[in-house]
Amino acid sequence: MFSYYAVLNAAVFAVAWRRNWHALNMLGFVFTFGIGALWGKQYYRPELFASIEPFLLLFSAFYLLIPVLTSLRAPAGGRAVSTTLTFGLPLLAFPLQAALLDGDRMPLAFSALVAALVYALLATWLIRRTVAQLLGQSFALLAMGFATLSIPLAFSAEQTAMAWALEGVAAIWLGLRQNRRWPQLAGWVLQALAGASFFFGQEVWLGLETGGLSRLGVPTAISLGLLAVTAFTTAFLYDRHAPQRVTVWPWFVVGLAWWHLLGVHEAERAAFHESFVLSWLLFASASIALTALLRKSLAWPRLSWAMLVLWMPAPVLVALTAWDLRSPLADVGGLAWLGWGMASAFGLWRLRAPVARLTGLSHILVLLTAVLLFAVEFTIRLDRDAELGDAWVIAAALLPLLLVSWGLWRKQHWFAWPLQDHFAHYARYWHGLASAGILLALCVIWMMPGSTAPLAYLPLLNPLDLIQGLILLALWRAWTALGHGGRVVLASAAFISLTQSTLRAVYHWSDGIWGPSLLDTASAQAALTVVWSLLGVTAWVLGSRRQRYALWLPGAILMGVVLLKMLLVDRHYLGDLAGVVAVLTVGLLLVGVGYIAPSPPRRVSEESAT
């Protein structure tokens, strides 16, 4: 029967060689493959493969070449293309081939690859001829389809993902070069299929179910790296050919996601010194250095965002390394953080030209990470290893922030390297963040008892009081340009600091308990009355002598508060020696004020002086 069909189809082909008879071509095609499919369903057995396969190849060759003859003969500039024969043949012939091979993957993959090669050769030949360009482009599409189909038939999910990703970026490159949308769309679809093939492949899916990516090994790492590179390459191509399109950022974000997934995989698999955090830190350091190199080599400033994303979790990594190790710089942690610091310095150095909008944020993140790293290290070392009192621990923890803040304020050319020439553009953000951190540190200091063990406690000459004074002095010098609001905040912080220092001295020199209950003692109330009176009288006298109403008024208000406090609170402690001393001290101070500064300064003088 098939020999008879071969003769009939040879006659159809001979007619097609001489003239275009579409109806005859369609009749032969439908009957040949339709009856062949029905016969195969009922009578085919695997042992008949050697006798049936040649006929399937012969019939496919007839109806593959008939559209070629038709297109070459057409005078309409290549528009006469038989859609049914062109696209119907692979849709019918390849499933029949799969049935003949009984689903055997490797022979079927080889068949798809051969089909792709045949279609590619015909496409190359036809596209060069003006009258057959449309058919050549159709064959090129079919060649890409068969090549894509051959990959999952022959390889694993990971290998399929890599091949489809490469094929996808090649299609996008071709579409951009030719300014055509269909190849670009095909490239998007192929890369999406690559991602789906990776995630839903049997090996990767089983690896995720059985304990994470670390079980998947080196092939998975290669696949993730290639998927990231192809996504970044796609973003790079769109940035070069069509930078105004919104297609750049989606692919850039996809590339970042693949790359960070690769980092998770490698951190789990390598486990440097059995620490996931250290492994991730090393991966981030290497990624920052690589990105910094490529940013200038490729002239692609958008890679600055990749460095920013790698720097963003760094402050959290400080806490994680402290949790994972004895301290962030313990054991090999010091080497890991040294590598991160060198890579970050190199990355910031590469950000100098061209300067991106995010350069300031990147620099601030690196500075903040360095401050946190040494603050946490000093805290752990002094608290756990040296067993010093909390005053020493807190003072040491604040030193990195104070040192860096002072350096960026007074010695920018040293402390802001390698971006010292650009730091002035975003210095206010760092100084604002540092000021907020310093004020928060003051709040922490106010809550601490300030143990100076193993040394004895000395008022005003202990670490907490000294660090408080240093902070207030630095804020006073740094906030000179601020208005009335800044001066009020600073004065309030100074008043609270002096109050807490007084209560801390009472706590250490008495048998009281640090906490709110300390205020319910005669010694604490007497000490506060004396200190507040001295502070108020000093402001009162200086304001009167210097004719500064803004200084005199707070002193007068504070003295009023002291008198009200004596009336409502201190009268309960008059039977105690401390209470009597406090009352006498306030009385003597008021008498002295009446003699030295009997009248307040005029507000008009203050306004004119201002």
Image: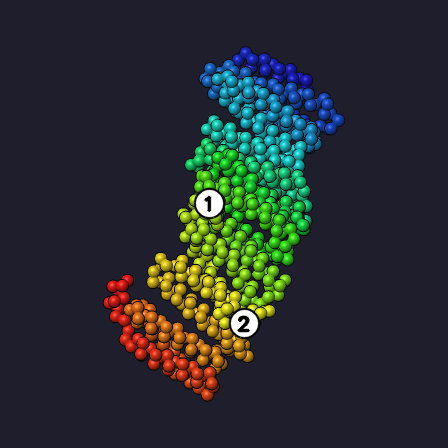
Please identify the quarter of the rendering in which residue 26 is found: top right
What secondary structure is found at the residue carrying circle 1? loop
Q: Furthest residue to the top?
A: 18
Q: Furthest residue to the right?
A: 47
Task: Name the foreground residue: 8 vs 430.
Answer: 430
Task: Name the foreground residue: 214 vs 57.
Answer: 214
Residue 371 image position (x, y, % from top left):
52, 55
Circle 2: residue type: Tyr
Question: Looking at the image, which residue is at 60% across and 40% down?
Answer: 224
Q: Which numbered disc covers residue 419?
A: 1
What secondary structure is found at the residue carrying circle 2? loop
Which is closer to the viewer, label 2 or label 1? 2
In this rendering, the answer to whether 539 lies above or below 395 is below
Binning the other alpha carbons within 10 Å of mark 2 as few (below 14), some (14 to 19) or many (20 upward) gives some
Question: Looking at the image, which residue is at 42% across and 51% down?
Answer: 427
Residue 42 appearing in the image: no
Can you identify the residue that label 2 sits on? 457
Residue 292 image position (x, y, % from top left):
52, 40
Please identify the quarter of the rendering in which residue 538 is found: bottom left
In the rendered image, the quadrant that contains the N terminus is top right
2 and 1 marks in contact (CB < 8 Å): no
